[in-house]
Amino acid sequence: MNQTVRKITGSFLILILMALYAILATTFAAANLAQSSGWIHLVYFFLTGILWILPAMFIIKWMLKPDQG
């Protein structure tokens, strides 16, 4: 697979990752943090807002891998 195809595929994978991650994080918060204080919500959404970057970094690293050959 050449780099151009990897970039297109990776872009779609990141969009899917972000959508699924946002849905899961929000669903978990609504189900488990409904009665929590605002500070708990702030910390939770701050951390979950940063954590999606970890899997995205692996996708980006894969996308930018140079072509072989």
Image (spheres, rainbow, N blue to C red):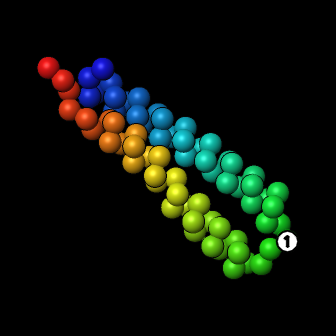
**Which residue shows up at 47% across the image and 46% down it?**
55
Horizontal relation, residue 45 to residue 60: left or right: right
State the residue position of label 1: 35
Horizontal relation, residue 41 to residue 8: left or right: right
Quadrant (top left, top right, bottom left, bottom right) of the C terminus? top left
Q: Amino acid at mark 1?
A: Gln
Residue 49 image offset from top left, x and y in percent: 55, 61
SS class, disc 1: loop
Quadrant (top left, top right, bottom left, bottom right) of the N terminus? top left
Task: Work out which residue is located at the far left of the displayed protein and give it.
Answer: 69
**Which residue shows up at 62% across the image and 42% down it?**
20
Horizontal relation, residue 57 to residue 20: left or right: left
Q: How many numbered discs sit on the rendered protein?
A: 1
Q: Of residues 37 and 4, which is closer to you in this image?
A: 37
Rendered image quadrant of residue 63: top left
Rendered image quadrant of residue 48: bottom right
Residue 34 image offset from top left, x and y in percent: 83, 66
Rendered image quadrant of residue 33: bottom right
Question: Dot 1: few (<14), some (14–19), or many (≥20) neighbours within 10 Å?
Answer: few
Q: Relative to 16, is 68 above or below? A: above
**Which residue shows up at 27% across the image and 38% down it?**
64
**Which residue shows up at 61% across the image and 47% down it?**
21
Horizontal relation, residue 15 to residue 39: left or right: left
